[in-house]
Image (cartoon, rainbow, N blue to C red):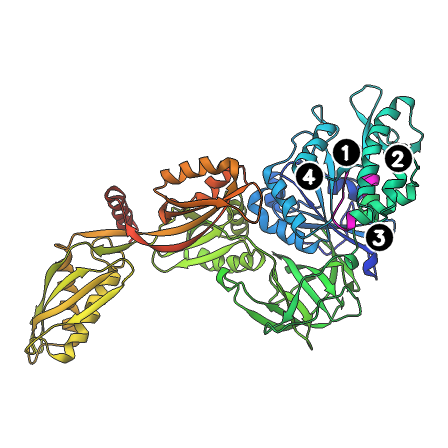
Amino acid sequence: MAQKNQEKGVTGGVPVVTEPARVRNVVLVGHSGAGKTTLVEALLAASGTIGRAGTVADGTTVCDHDPAAVRQQRSVSLACAPLMHRDVKVNLLDTPGYGDFVGELRAGLRAADAALFVVSAVDGMDAATAALWEECAAVDMPRAVAVTRLDHPRADFDEAVALCQRVFGDNVLPLYLPMLGDDGVSVVGLLGLITRRVFDYTAGLPAAVREPDPEHLPAIVESRNELIEGIIAESEDETLMDRYLGGEEIDTEVLITDLEKAVVRGHFYPVVPVCAETGVGLDALLDGLVAAFPSPLEHELPAVTGVDGSPRPPLICDPDGPLVAEVVKTTVDRHVGRVSLVRVFSGTLRPDQVVHVSGHGMAERGHPDHDADERVGHIYSPLGAQLREVTACVAGDLCALTKSGSAETGDTISAKEEPLLIAPWEMPEPLLPVAIVAKSRADEDALARNLARLVAGDPTLRLERNAETHQLVLWCMGEAHADVVLDRLRAGGVELETEPVRVALRETLTAGARGHGRHVKQSGGHGQYAVCDIEVAPLPRGAGFEFVDKVVGGAVPHNYIPSVEKGVRAQMERGLVAGFPVVDLRVTLFDGKAHSVDSSDAAFQTAGALALRDAAEKGQPALLEPVDEVTIRVPDSSVGAVLGDLSGRRGRVLGTEPDADAEGRTLVRAEVPATELVRYAVELRSMTAGTGTFRREFARYDPMPAHLADQARKEHANHP
């Protein structure tokens, strides 16, 4: 629940800066359970932002304020937690580690200028984290690594670093080594490799700095030499390596300066050991975030165009420039209303300012293009769910806005006089359908209201009202995402149930046949009289419907021939055997009878429908199922499992090829019946440890196997 008051436990003042150089936007990424939220909580406490760190287990952390996150004890949404350190504002963006919430992760990457990869010294990392590193590398995003959970009995810092070096590549080197206590197990300090000093946390924060003991020197010397060589290799001073190899002692300040420059360029990745529970390394990590990570002035900004798509000059992070900001996350709070987390890229956002809000390119996901002028109300600095009012938000900083009438995730906020549009970030396609049903008529109204709020805030959620199956379908990223969405709907007072997702099938006839339609009624006055004879023939798949008139001698009056076609088309929409629309059929009208008084348009429509139904009894009806062309992107090691699974889904593999965009990955192309893909998003993730992705596109309709067709007919009979 968003709150506008200063909650108990928040001891620091509201962090406010007036220049971009004093801002650092850092997104924390890593697999679920690595300790991201716990680390953020510890950093907030270490910086004095909060008086005492909460815990994930107790549901008392700043970032995991969502009821679903508290219940599941894992992050399910992006959260912003700013703090001040050395007169610099650090906006920490805590992201979920579970793959279902990748939309929240991508929003965090969009809002940030650097990424802190959080790796557990106990559990290592998952393949999705490794893939994310490659994504960051593709755009040269500065990165660092925090190795957490050092206090665990099974913690192994050296192995965690070795793993990072194997997975992330070169230039992943520690700046510090953990220092063990007298018991030889607990971590009580850090050994600084550049400064050759000991940082002792025995008495808590801040660390006591002293000279190393003799037993520490061998480890420091060995790791320090490797670190210095890595820094010098990235130095812009080409003479530095020769001087170092010649035995010259390189000044510490020179090393630190070159290190910071290499990190900003995205070419060097320092590793810092931290322990959130004991405080070891927290101040060292904060120092590194402030000193080595870039300010918004040093990070490339997204491209912009006019609202009409016309080109515009590149953005500059200038508080006095034209206003350009982006809504990176939208939530709807029952008490406050719509809350938008905003990254300001250019200009300064101020209260009572009239701005232009643009949202384009998301119509397929239920977000129609929209443009509106709105007046900004209050501006807040968000701390998790808390909203603390500020007087302005300058270029490079993050803030929260409330009560916007139209702002949705991904929208651009710009000056009313010069509306602009920021190029959207890549958002994955939701591929797990969940059909929902409201329990009552009253729940239907509440469901519509709550769905509109959820869709506005979550671009990875797509809403579909399927006119053929008469189902309301939510397309989600996976089961965990679906659970959170359903929980939020129920929390909004909606009683609902889920039901199996039905796939829209088609019917056709596989053999030619003749049909006779006779509609004759007499009940006093004008009666109804129409007789028609038709011949049906199957057409090639995808050919559609053809109606041919071969009546001779006026057996069916010319003005009633369109009525016969209309009746045939209506019956095709209603279906012939199982109630599914009929496709790929030629119907030829060759004979019939009419009455000078009792024939009518309605009578011949009915006769046409009866004739088609009569022909269907002899024309070997069959069910057709949609077949999708699927492109699956998986690690090379998973190709065998994926191919075997596709065979079990009645899939036809079209081919495999190396992924040109990522080394060690393969693209598998196949055609798979849509009925076999309902839960494929979940099962592919299980097969590939969360690293497999796929996209699908309708290809055609194919005949359904007889045993499955019988089952589909029975299911349709229960859900007409």
- Residue behind mark 3: 88
Q: Is residue 97 above or below residue 186?
A: below
**Mark 2 secondary-structure assignment:** loop
Residue at the image point whose x is 73% and y is 63% from the top: 345
Distance CA(mark 2)–CA(mark 1): 13 Å
Distance CA(mark 2)–CA(mark 3): 20 Å
Q: Earlier in the sequence, mark 3 or mark 4?
A: 3
Distance CA(mark 2)–CA(mark 4): 31 Å
Q: Amino acid at mark 4?
A: Gly
- Residue behind mark 4: 169
CB atoms at circles 2 and 4 under 8 Å apart?
A: no
Q: Earlier in the sequence, mark 2 or mark 4?
A: 4
Distance CA(mark 3)–CA(mark 4): 31 Å
Q: Position of residue 348 (x, y in %)?
A: 77, 67
**Residues in magenta, as a range:** 263-286
Answer yes or no: is residue 40 visible: yes
CB atoms at circles 3 and 4 under 8 Å apart?
A: no
Q: Nearer the viewer, residue 670 or 357?
A: 670
Residue 278 in the figure: left or right of residue 598: right
- Residue behind mark 1: 275
- Residue behind mark 2: 207
| Residue 569 found in image quarter | bottom left
Answer yes or no: is residue 281 visible: no
Q: Amino acid at mark 3?
A: Val
Q: Is residue 103 above or below residue 588?
A: above
Tag 3: Cα neighbours inside 10 Å, few (<14), some, or many (≥20)?
many
Q: Amino acid at mark 1?
A: Cys
Q: Position of residue 654 (x, y in %)?
A: 39, 47
**Mark 4 secondary-structure assignment:** loop
